[in-house]
Amino acid sequence: MKLSDRSITATLRRHGYKLTPQRRVVIHTLTSSPDHLTPAEIFEKVSKNHSGIGLVTIYRTLKLLVELGLICELHTGDNCPSYTAGTPRHHHHLICSGCGKVVDFAGANIIENSLSTLEARLSHESGFRIDDHLLEFTGLCQVCQERQSPSG
Amino acid sequence: MKLSDRSITATLRRHGYKLTPQRRVVIHTLTSSPDHLTPAEIFEKVSKNHSGIGLVTIYRTLKLLVELGLICELHTGDNCPSYTAGTPRHHHHLICSGCGKVVDFAGANIIENSLSTLEARLSHESGFRIDDHLLEFTGLCQVCQERQSPSG
DNA sequence: CTGCTAAATGAAAAATATTGTCAGTTGCAC
DNA sequence: GTGCAACTGACAATATTTTTCATTTAGCAG
């Protein structure tokens, strides 16, 4: 789910973080862009309207937003990760291996469909020629669960 | 599918690449490890048995093996990617967010199951507590397809 | 509004990750 | 065994990210 500037800034304040112009402009850059952006790309966009902002601040802001679960970090295979506004749980991406374009797809019933059904549907709806897929489940293994439990 | 040393080296030779001791030891390190390894980890392991091998050679070998589709590159969210022996198509991973352990899961019928069914089955079989998932389809968008087609 | 304080910023340097260059070495076809 | 193209290691260069620290500022109290 893509969040608005307001809900992101509200969460920042709720957690006791200050709302600086730099943070605002990074957040707005992310929410107003349909694409996933690398730190360097964000820096470039941000610098146009807010000259003087440091790349370091971009990194710090992105890190903070990821920690708070307000934006989504994506590793496509290039060296650096890219970011987009949106809750990080349940990423569903359609990636073009030609130009690197990333399209998010969503829908409540995704999880109820088989991969082959999804692939056919997405291919039809988006015009992509789908060649491959990556499916990752993230969680805690048994050992780490035991380590986390109060009995341990 | 996990490939053997022999099938990997055979493919190298088939493509006209030379079979150096350095390449052999990198390949063997990957095929003999159940885990995904970062370039630095491979360098460390390799250095024990084959002192003098350069980190640059590790990078070059990994890049080559990825290009040939002989090993699989995985981006888990850390800075650097990790590698494992195995064909890179249709990655299915189970990642522990506690310790970073990566388990591959496979099976011909994965693609016929819904995500919720898979999640339940994996959770039961592996003991993982699954919190999240990432699903990515890779292919060519319409624009890139047209650019690739002979008529363009 | 003014002043205070902890948090945030920017600049530079350091750390980390990856690639490029090139002289010397080596696998492998003959 | 010989020759050549491919490969390697060392170093440099580049790219990405984090650390450090002096200065600035958002948000709060008065």
Image: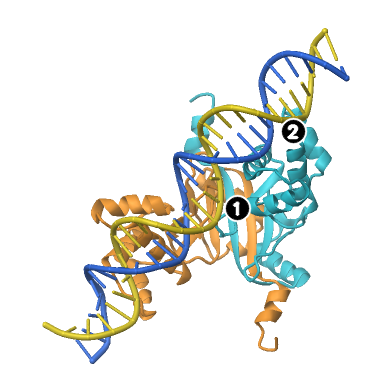
Chain colours: A cyan, B orange, C blue, D yellow
User: Any mark on residue A12, and which?
Assistant: 2
Pick whichever, A33 or D25, lies toward us. Answer: D25
Q: Quadrant of residue A100?
A: bottom right
**Rendered position, B13 above or below B48:** below
Whether residue B71 sits left or right of residue A65 in the image: it is left
Amino acid residing under circle 2: Leu
Amino acid residing under circle 1: Pro
In what element is the residue under mark 1? loop
- Badge 1 and badge 2 in a common chain: yes
Q: What residue is shown at x 73% (from left), y 46% (from top)?
A: A51
Whether residue B85 sits left or right of residue B112 in the image: it is left
Pick whichever, A11 or A56, lies toward us. Answer: A56
Pick whichever, C6 or A148, lies toward us. Answer: C6
Residue B43's x, y, as percent? 35, 53
Q: Quadrant of residue A62?
A: top right
Pick whichever, B136 or A58, lies toward us. Answer: A58
Residue D24's x, y, as percent? 71, 30
Whether residue B85 sits left or right of residue A108 in the image: it is left
In what element is the residue under mark 2? helix
Please state the chain letter of the residue tagged with numbered disc 1 in the rendered image: A
Whether residue A146 sits left or right of residue A35 in the image: it is left
Residue A88: in sight, yes or no? no
Give the CA separation, mark 1 to mark 2: 22 Å
**Rendered position, B46 above or below A121:** above
On the image, numbered disc 1 is attached to which residue? Answer: A81
Please state the chain letter of the residue tagged with numbered disc 2 in the rendered image: A
Q: Which badge, 1 or 2, is on the more N-terminal residue?
A: 2
User: Any mark on residue A113, and which?
Assistant: none
- Mark 2 residue crowding within 10 angstroms, few (<14) / some (14–19) / many (20+): some
**Rendered position, B50 above or below B100:** below
Disc 1 to disc 2: CB gap under 8 Å: no
- Mark 1 residue crowding within 10 angstroms, few (<14) / some (14–19) / many (20+): some
